[in-house]
Each structure stands twice: as structure tokens, then as C-alpha cells.
Amino acid sequence: MMTSGKYHSRTMGWAASAILGLVAAGCGNVVAGGLVFGEATVVVSGDADTLALAAQFSTQPTVATVPRFSFHEGESEVEGEVDARFHVFMITEGGASLQLGDEEIRVRVDLRGRNEVDAVRELVPARRYTEFRLVFREIKAEVQGLVIDGVPVPEVRVELEDLSLLVARPIDLDVTDGERVELVVDLNTAAWLGAVNPLTGGVDQTVFQDLVNVVVR
């Protein structure tokens, strides 16, 4: 697996502090001899086959999409990368929010899904998590070979109305002591690139919001 972008890894001391904070809020477990926690890694792909991943690894719903074109069927000339800036949160069954990474995460991935980026790795309390949230600050793609309605489009940008965009997805993740879990964020680029306005290079934020998939792997 190829990696790029900013990779976050916390020290044990910080993680313990964060976990104690959730414990104090009634959202963690403490046993004799120490804290109970697992490890969560968030992986980002520009165009993963998350429908297949969901069938293999998870019972969670994903968004079935019908893109205006496909990278895998007659559109091999389309190349480029997606640049995204965001924050990541896992929500416990009790509603407590745990941020992964103490600063903004930035990744740059191949828009055809040829690589995956380990965006953040974090110690998390051994709990049941029912929601995964991404707060995007910027999403743009630099593209070669994209033509919409006869107009070449070299750059595509998701138009954020309020300078940020919340994408929330349900998950059913029960982290146990010492367990390592991986969450795959599929930016599903093929779907929303086809929705670009060729005159402005913009994509409506609701289109992007509906098309991002998250799968527990």
C-alpha cells in the first residue's frame, strides 16, 4: 500500500489523556492495571470499490452511485489527483465525540484509486462506535483528460458554502482491548467529477456529500 500526505501518530501519553477524558465523560472503560483501548487507522482512497468492501467486511450501508462516466470503462485517459483537507471524528454509542488527529489532516490521492493513504492512526477507547464524521475544509482535483459536454476541465473544486462540510456516516464498530481496526474513506471521485459544471469547475457540495462512502475493513 502506497502512502502519502500527512500521517498522524500520537504518543501514548497524549492518547491516555484523551481516553481519560472520555472515561470521565462516562464513555470509556478502566480496568485494574490500566486503560482499555484499541487502535483505529483511517485510510483514504480516491476511488475504492467500497460496495465490494462493504459486502466483504461490513454490514454497513454504502451509497450506490451511477457516475456519468467511469474510470474503468472507456475513460482511461482521465488522470489526476485529489487534494482534501479535513478533520475526523468517531462518535460513541453514547454520543461522545472523539477527534482523531490533533490538527487538520491533508491527503493527496490518485483520483482513480491506484493508491491509498493512511491519513491518521489513533488510540481509541474500547467502546462501540456508531457514527463516523468527516469535516472537510477543501476538496479539489487536478485532472488531465476530463471533458464534460465538450469542455476540457483541468481543475475541479467542491464548492463549500460555509467554508466546511460535514459528512456523517453510520458505522457499527465495537473496538475491543488491543484490537486494530481500519476505516476506509472512499472519496468516490468518478461519481462527483461527472457532476462538475464545466464553465466554473465547481461541484455542488451536496453532490459530494452524498457520494462519499465509509467502510470498516
Image: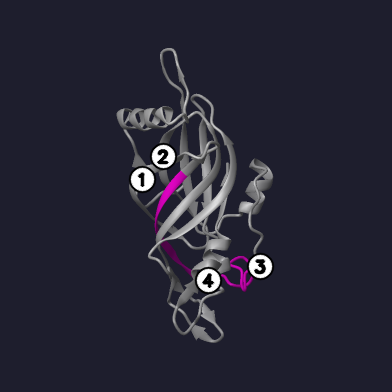
Q: Which residues are magenta?
A: 67-89
N-terminal-most mark, 1 or 4: 1
Badge 1 local density, few (<14 within 10 Å), some, or many (20+)? some
Which residue is tagged 4? 193
Q: Is residue 16 left or right of residue 152?
A: left
Secondary structure of the residue carrying numbered label 1: loop
143 is higher (above) or lower (below) than 183: below
Which residue is tagged 2? 121
Three-letter amino acid code at disc 3?
Val
Q: Residue at x 63, y 47 (%)?
A: 53
N-terminal-most mark, 2 or 1: 1
Secondary structure of the residue carrying numbered label 2: strand
Badge 4 local density, few (<14 within 10 Å), some, or many (20+)? many
Secondary structure of the residue carrying numbered label 3: loop
Q: Residue at x 50, y 59 (%)?
A: 46
| Mark 3 → mark 4, Cα distance in angstroms | 12 Å
Which residue is tagged 3? 66
Q: Is residue 214 left or right of residue 56?
A: left
Badge 3 local density, few (<14 within 10 Å), some, or many (20+)? few
Mark 3 and mark 4 in contact? Answer it, CB < 8 Å.
Answer: no
